[in-house]
Image (cartoon, rainbow, N blue to C red):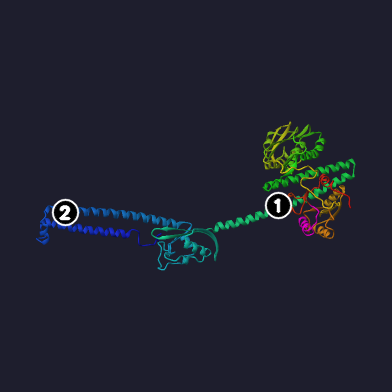
Amino acid sequence: MPSPYNKDKPGISLRKLIIASLVFLSILMVIFTCFGVANLAGALGPSPMIVYMQQFSDRILFFHSVAFVVICSVLISLLIVMIRRLDSHQRFNEGMYHLFSSVFSSLNVGLIVLDSEKKLRFVNPVARRLLLLDGLVNPEGQKSPQGEASLEGLDYSRILSPVLVPVAEKLSSSLANGESFSREFRVFLPEGIRCLQLDFFSFAENELGQVHVISLEDKTPEDDIRQKLSQQLEETHRYAVSKDNFFANMSHEIRTPINAILGMTYLARTVTEEPRCVEYIRKIENASEILLGVVNDILDFSKMQEHKFSLKPENFNLSDLRKIMTDLFSLKAQQKGLDFHINFDCGDSFFVFGDQFRLTQVFMNLVSNAIKFTDAGSVAVTLNHEIVGKDVILRCSVRDTGCGLSEDDLSKLFTDFEQFGEVLVKSHEGTGLGLAICKRLVELMHGVIWVDSTLNKGSSFHFVVVLKKPEQVIQPDGQLPQLQLHLAGRTGRVLIVEDNEINSEIAETLLKESGFVTERVVDGLEAVDLCRSLPADHFDLILMDIHMPRMNGYDAARILKRELLLPCPILAVTATSERTDMLEANRDLIAGWLLKPYSPGVFRNLFGRMCVPLQ
């Protein structure tokens, strides 16, 4: 690319040649014109040449002279036209050249052009500013039209320091082999850190040979924004981790006293038959269960809002779901004088692959609402299944003859925090999250939920979910599907590792009901010390709380299994909402989990048939 400061304008040599030809032809034309006129007038006298030419007709000689003059005139005209066209093209080229030079000079991107000898041919003002070249001049000390020192003719190595030093090696190799590249780099300067984007490419030009182009763009503002965003992202991540830890700890801290309340009310009910005490205990249990439901709803909703909610599919028997609902709601419906019906079209042994806990949660929310808002009549639960390939489609409904819903309530039924009726005059407890959680759970199971309702006549909630055929056939054995325990020695001894005295007492009482002999320690460190002093097969089972001071349950289980090589299974006991994530990460240490509050029914089902007399 020609330098904008080159005084040798394009096309000037050709123009001089054309002008010289024009002058030469003009001189010839004048000579022959004068010669012809003089010949006709006889002004030259009888010279030898004239005598020779007079042998021809004077008329022929005159016409030859005229013809030559005409030819010269035509040639002169053509030369004049060519000069004018050349001037026009030159003006156009100069205009375009100045246009491109102005464009390149006004770009926000630095532009540097090198010739085949790696000499500077063009440097725009932005490049001069970015490369700190204001004090650099070429060997001749030329000036640009803007009054700046011209850099034309300098070797490219003169502009490397200090800005291009980080990419000097790559730039040198690319100048040698013509390879294009793009790189963003930071350079430390006295005025601060600057981030630059460098792009390099080369191409062949007819007159200049290989031309190399370097573009520079100041990315410092964008880099500052990226760094600030990165810091904000780190802070957001730390906040998310802190939030997760907060919810986990809150779940543990709230569920622990609820577990104590429910456990102690269960124990109190077993030692008294006085009607008033039994009634008080029943009310305490109901209030505790409501509080536990509110806590579970809030924690589940929080996980859904953070998009951290996922299903944990497993093989399970649908008849277990029917039994759970019968056990939970038959008595409540009877106490309100309601008819309660459950109709599943599958047999007693019909296994599917899905999240049993979350499907049960959907049914429990809907059935609980149906009983809550129905004062007379009935509540009916139906489930119909259809097998399509590997999918098992469940069509479920919960019908009641309760208060029904208005059109206004129907429009916002599955909205977060919405409740039936006015808050100030409500007669039923609840957070307004139950149906919103049901909707999201059903959608996670690739289904849909809807409602048909008439005010003061009742409602019918319908939902469809898609499960899978079981991965393998499982025969029912009466155990919880989450726990497949294999007791090593069957000595009847169980170690309870629990820092909360009330929870430890509840677990001990429930285990003693099943015939076990228990020992209690308050944290993982005491459990490790105790097991070191006893034979490895002393305990048949260890109930290990996860959240404990000094040493948590997972660390203690790691020592017991990997260092002391205990053969007995370890059950993780937790009150946190994320009960399976850490379990999966510690699958080789933990045989299963128990969720607080303790359920007497779970203890009876799990441990009731395991106990054997002490040796």
* Image-quadrant location for residue 368: top right
> Mark 2 and mark 1: span between their CA atoms?
110 Å
2 or 1: tag closer to the N-terminus: 2
> Residue 286: in sight, yes or no?
yes
Q: Is residue 349 left or right of residue 215?
A: right
**Foreground residue among 113 and 129:** 113
Residue 447 sits inside the magenta stretch: no
Q: Residue at x 24, y 54 (%)?
A: 75
Q: Secondary structure at mark 2?
A: helix
* Image-quadrant location for residue 204: bottom left
- Amino acid type of the residue tagged 2 in the rendering: His
The local crowd at label 1, few if under 14, some if 14 to 19, many if 20 or more residues have their Cα within 10 Å, is some
- Amino acid type of the residue tagged 1 in the rendering: Asp
Residue 20 circle label: none
Residue under numbered circle 2: 64
Residue under numbered circle 1: 244
Q: What range of the chain is rendered magenta?
A: 552-570
**Looking at the image, is 360 positioned above or below residue 84?**
above
Residue 563 sits inside the magenta stretch: yes
Q: Looking at the rendering, in which quadrant would you find the N terminus?
A: bottom left
The local crowd at label 2, few if under 14, some if 14 to 19, many if 20 or more residues have their Cα within 10 Å, is few
Q: Is residue 518 left or right of residue 39?
A: right
> Residue 574: in sight, yes or no?
no
**Foreground residue among 115 and 609:** 609
Which x, y percent locates residue 143?
A: 40, 65
Which x, y percent locates residue 42?
A: 10, 58
Count numbered badges in the picture: 2
Q: Is residue 80 left or right of residue 436?
A: left
Q: Residue at x 43, y 55 (%)?
A: 103
Is the residue under label 1 in contact with that under label 2 (CB below 8 Å)?
A: no
Which x, y percent locates residue 167?
A: 52, 63
Q: Secondary structure at mark 1?
A: helix
